[in-house]
Amino acid sequence: MRIEAVQGDITEQHVDAVVNAANTSLLGGGGVDGAIHRRGGGEILEACRRLRATDYPDGLPVGSAVATTAGELPAQWVIHTVGPTYSSSEDRSASLASCYRESLRVADSLGARSVAFPAVSTGVYRYPVEAAAEIAVAEVRATDSAVELVRFVLFDERTRSVFAEVLDRD
Ligand code: AR6
Protein backbone atom coordinates (compact mmCIF):
# COMPACT_ATOMS: atom_id res chain seq x y z
CA MET A 1 0.00 0.00 0.00
CA ARG A 2 1.32 3.44 -0.93
CA ILE A 3 0.46 6.22 1.53
CA GLU A 4 0.86 9.91 0.66
CA ALA A 5 -0.07 13.31 2.06
CA VAL A 6 -1.07 16.14 -0.27
CA GLN A 7 -2.56 19.57 0.17
CA GLY A 8 -5.88 19.97 -1.63
CA ASP A 9 -9.63 19.67 -1.77
CA ILE A 10 -11.01 16.19 -1.23
CA THR A 11 -13.92 16.80 -3.61
CA GLU A 12 -11.48 17.11 -6.54
CA GLN A 13 -9.70 13.79 -6.04
CA HIS A 14 -9.69 11.27 -8.89
CA VAL A 15 -9.65 8.18 -6.72
CA ASP A 16 -12.08 5.28 -6.37
CA ALA A 17 -13.46 6.46 -3.03
CA VAL A 18 -13.30 9.64 -0.98
CA VAL A 19 -13.97 9.56 2.74
CA ASN A 20 -16.39 12.05 4.26
CA ALA A 21 -15.91 13.39 7.79
CA ALA A 22 -19.63 13.14 8.44
CA ASN A 23 -21.77 13.27 11.57
CA THR A 24 -24.11 10.67 13.02
CA SER A 25 -27.14 12.12 11.23
CA LEU A 26 -25.57 11.47 7.80
CA LEU A 27 -27.62 14.42 6.61
CA GLY A 28 -24.83 16.91 5.97
CA GLY A 29 -23.04 19.70 7.77
CA GLY A 30 -20.05 22.01 7.28
CA GLY A 31 -16.39 21.38 6.44
CA VAL A 32 -15.63 18.33 4.31
CA ASP A 33 -19.21 17.12 4.68
CA GLY A 34 -20.66 20.38 3.34
CA ALA A 35 -18.20 20.43 0.43
CA ILE A 36 -18.92 16.81 -0.56
CA HIS A 37 -22.69 17.29 -0.56
CA ARG A 38 -22.42 20.65 -2.37
CA ARG A 39 -20.06 19.41 -5.10
CA GLY A 40 -21.49 15.90 -5.36
CA GLY A 41 -25.10 16.97 -5.77
CA GLY A 42 -28.37 15.76 -4.29
CA GLU A 43 -27.84 12.10 -5.16
CA ILE A 44 -25.53 11.68 -2.16
CA LEU A 45 -28.06 13.15 0.27
CA GLU A 46 -30.80 10.96 -1.19
CA ALA A 47 -28.62 7.89 -0.65
CA CYS A 48 -27.89 9.03 2.92
CA ARG A 49 -31.60 9.49 3.59
CA ARG A 50 -32.23 5.94 2.36
CA LEU A 51 -29.56 4.63 4.73
CA ARG A 52 -31.25 6.45 7.61
CA ALA A 53 -34.59 4.95 6.61
CA THR A 54 -33.18 1.42 6.41
CA ASP A 55 -29.92 0.31 8.04
CA TYR A 56 -29.28 3.31 10.32
CA PRO A 57 -32.54 4.64 11.80
CA ASP A 58 -30.58 6.01 14.80
CA GLY A 59 -27.77 7.37 12.65
CA LEU A 60 -24.25 6.13 11.89
CA PRO A 61 -22.35 5.42 15.13
CA VAL A 62 -19.05 7.17 15.86
CA GLY A 63 -16.17 5.11 14.44
CA SER A 64 -18.33 3.37 11.81
CA ALA A 65 -18.30 3.80 8.03
CA VAL A 66 -20.78 3.31 5.20
CA ALA A 67 -20.65 3.95 1.45
CA THR A 68 -22.90 5.80 -0.98
CA THR A 69 -22.62 6.95 -4.56
CA ALA A 70 -20.29 9.92 -5.10
CA GLY A 71 -22.86 11.63 -7.31
CA GLU A 72 -21.13 14.18 -9.52
CA LEU A 73 -17.73 13.93 -7.85
CA PRO A 74 -14.85 12.42 -9.86
CA ALA A 75 -14.67 9.55 -7.37
CA GLN A 76 -16.99 6.56 -7.64
CA TRP A 77 -18.00 6.29 -3.99
CA VAL A 78 -18.18 8.37 -0.85
CA ILE A 79 -17.38 6.48 2.33
CA HIS A 80 -19.02 8.34 5.21
CA THR A 81 -17.41 7.97 8.62
CA VAL A 82 -18.09 9.73 11.92
CA GLY A 83 -15.09 10.85 13.93
CA PRO A 84 -15.18 11.53 17.67
CA THR A 85 -15.38 15.07 19.01
CA TYR A 86 -12.15 15.81 20.87
CA SER A 87 -12.20 15.62 24.65
CA SER A 88 -9.30 16.60 26.93
CA SER A 89 -10.71 14.40 29.71
CA GLU A 90 -11.43 11.22 27.74
CA ASP A 91 -9.17 9.34 25.33
CA ARG A 92 -11.16 8.89 22.12
CA SER A 93 -8.26 7.75 19.96
CA ALA A 94 -9.78 4.26 19.54
CA SER A 95 -12.86 5.77 17.91
CA LEU A 96 -10.72 7.84 15.55
CA ALA A 97 -8.61 4.80 14.64
CA SER A 98 -11.83 2.88 13.99
CA CYS A 99 -12.87 5.46 11.37
CA TYR A 100 -9.79 4.66 9.29
CA ARG A 101 -10.00 0.89 9.80
CA GLU A 102 -13.74 0.72 9.04
CA SER A 103 -13.40 2.99 6.00
CA LEU A 104 -10.74 0.68 4.56
CA ARG A 105 -12.95 -2.32 5.30
CA VAL A 106 -15.80 -0.68 3.37
CA ALA A 107 -13.37 0.21 0.56
CA ASP A 108 -12.36 -3.45 0.35
CA SER A 109 -15.98 -4.54 0.19
CA LEU A 110 -16.52 -2.16 -2.76
CA GLY A 111 -13.35 -3.26 -4.55
CA ALA A 112 -11.92 0.27 -4.28
CA ARG A 113 -8.17 0.39 -4.88
CA SER A 114 -7.51 4.08 -4.17
CA VAL A 115 -8.96 6.00 -1.23
CA ALA A 116 -8.62 9.66 -0.20
CA PHE A 117 -9.04 10.57 3.46
CA PRO A 118 -9.43 14.00 5.03
CA ALA A 119 -8.03 14.67 8.50
CA VAL A 120 -11.11 13.29 10.23
CA SER A 121 -12.14 15.10 13.47
CA THR A 122 -9.55 17.91 13.17
CA GLY A 123 -11.99 20.64 12.11
CA VAL A 124 -15.36 21.16 13.77
CA TYR A 125 -14.58 18.23 16.12
CA ARG A 126 -11.33 19.96 17.32
CA TYR A 127 -9.02 16.93 17.51
CA PRO A 128 -5.39 18.15 17.72
CA VAL A 129 -3.78 17.66 14.30
CA GLU A 130 -0.56 16.00 15.52
CA ALA A 131 -2.40 13.36 17.57
CA ALA A 132 -4.94 12.80 14.79
CA ALA A 133 -2.18 12.36 12.20
CA GLU A 134 -0.36 9.81 14.36
CA ILE A 135 -3.57 7.80 14.84
CA ALA A 136 -4.49 8.01 11.13
CA VAL A 137 -1.08 6.91 9.85
CA ALA A 138 -0.64 4.14 12.44
CA GLU A 139 -4.10 2.71 11.81
CA VAL A 140 -3.84 2.77 8.02
CA ARG A 141 -0.44 1.07 8.25
CA ALA A 142 -1.79 -1.56 10.64
CA THR A 143 -4.88 -2.39 8.56
CA ASP A 144 -4.75 -5.37 6.26
CA SER A 145 -6.43 -4.18 3.05
CA ALA A 146 -6.34 -4.61 -0.72
CA VAL A 147 -6.35 -0.81 -1.15
CA GLU A 148 -3.23 0.15 -3.10
CA LEU A 149 -3.22 3.91 -2.57
CA VAL A 150 -4.22 5.88 0.51
CA ARG A 151 -4.01 9.62 -0.03
CA PHE A 152 -4.44 11.96 2.91
CA VAL A 153 -5.87 15.17 1.44
CA LEU A 154 -5.23 18.06 3.77
CA PHE A 155 -6.87 21.42 3.27
CA ASP A 156 -4.10 23.62 4.62
CA GLU A 157 -0.31 23.49 4.40
CA ARG A 158 0.20 23.21 8.16
CA THR A 159 -1.93 20.06 8.38
CA ARG A 160 -0.23 18.62 5.30
CA SER A 161 3.22 19.16 6.81
CA VAL A 162 2.19 17.47 10.08
CA PHE A 163 0.90 14.41 8.20
CA ALA A 164 4.01 14.35 5.98
CA GLU A 165 6.26 14.51 9.03
CA VAL A 166 4.44 11.63 10.73
CA LEU A 167 4.61 9.60 7.50
CA ASP A 168 8.35 10.23 7.21
CA ARG A 169 9.09 9.04 10.74
CA ASP A 170 9.49 5.37 9.93
N1 AR6 B 1 -11.08 18.97 1.47
C1 AR6 B 1 -10.18 18.50 2.37
N2 AR6 B 1 -10.17 18.87 3.67
C2 AR6 B 1 -11.10 19.77 4.06
C3 AR6 B 1 -12.09 20.30 3.19
C4 AR6 B 1 -12.04 19.87 1.83
N3 AR6 B 1 -12.92 20.30 0.92
N4 AR6 B 1 -12.88 21.14 3.91
C5 AR6 B 1 -12.41 21.14 5.17
N5 AR6 B 1 -11.32 20.33 5.27
P1 AR6 B 1 -14.28 18.92 9.33
P2 AR6 B 1 -14.63 17.03 11.56
C6 AR6 B 1 -10.50 19.99 6.46
O1 AR6 B 1 -14.80 20.02 10.18
O2 AR6 B 1 -13.68 17.77 12.42
C7 AR6 B 1 -19.21 18.78 9.75
O3 AR6 B 1 -20.13 19.79 10.04
C8 AR6 B 1 -10.61 20.85 7.69
O4 AR6 B 1 -9.79 21.99 7.55
O5 AR6 B 1 -14.77 18.82 7.94
O6 AR6 B 1 -14.53 15.53 11.52
C9 AR6 B 1 -19.82 17.38 9.83
O7 AR6 B 1 -21.17 17.38 9.41
C10 AR6 B 1 -10.11 19.90 8.76
O8 AR6 B 1 -8.68 19.86 8.77
O9 AR6 B 1 -14.58 17.48 10.01
C11 AR6 B 1 -19.69 17.07 11.28
O10 AR6 B 1 -20.74 17.62 12.04
C12 AR6 B 1 -10.59 18.52 8.29
O11 AR6 B 1 -10.91 18.70 6.91
C13 AR6 B 1 -18.40 17.73 11.68
O12 AR6 B 1 -18.21 18.79 10.76
C14 AR6 B 1 -11.81 17.99 9.02
O13 AR6 B 1 -12.70 19.05 9.34
C15 AR6 B 1 -17.21 16.80 11.54
O14 AR6 B 1 -16.07 17.45 12.03
Image (tube, rainbow, N blue to C red):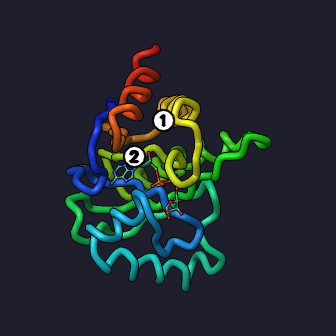
Q: Look at the numbered disc 1 and give the secondary structure of its residue.
A: helix
x and y percent of residue 155 in the render? 34, 44
x and y percent of residue 126 in the render? 58, 47
Q: Look at 31% across and 51% down and name the residue there.
A: 10
According to the picture, the residue beneath numbered tag 2 turns out to be: 117
- Tell me the amino acid under the disc marked 2: Phe
Q: Which mark is residue 123?
A: none
* Viewer-proximal residue among 133 and 14: 133
According to the picture, the residue beneath numbered tag 1 turns out to be: 140
- Tell me the amino acid under the disc marked 1: Val
* Viewer-proximal residue among 164 and 1: 164
| Residue 1 can be seen, yes or no | no
Which quadrant would the N terminus be assigned to in this image?
top left
Instruction: Locate residue 12 relative to residue 108 in the image: left or right.
Output: left
Q: Look at the numbered disc 2 and give the secondary structure of its residue.
A: strand
Q: Look at 63% across and 52% down and name the residue there.
A: 84
Neighbor class of circle 1 (other Cα within 10 Å; few <14, some 14-19, many 20+) is some
Would you identify the image quadrant in which residue 154 lies? top left
Q: Look at 57% across and 37% down and name the residue there.
A: 128
Q: Are marks 2 and 1 in contact (CB under 8 Å)?
A: yes
Labels 2 and 1: the sequence-earlier one? 2
Instruction: Locate residue 2 relative to residue 170 in the image: left or right.
Output: left
Outermost residue to the right: 89
Q: Look at 79% across and 41% down and name the residue there.
A: 89
* Viewer-proximal residue among 34 and 44: 34
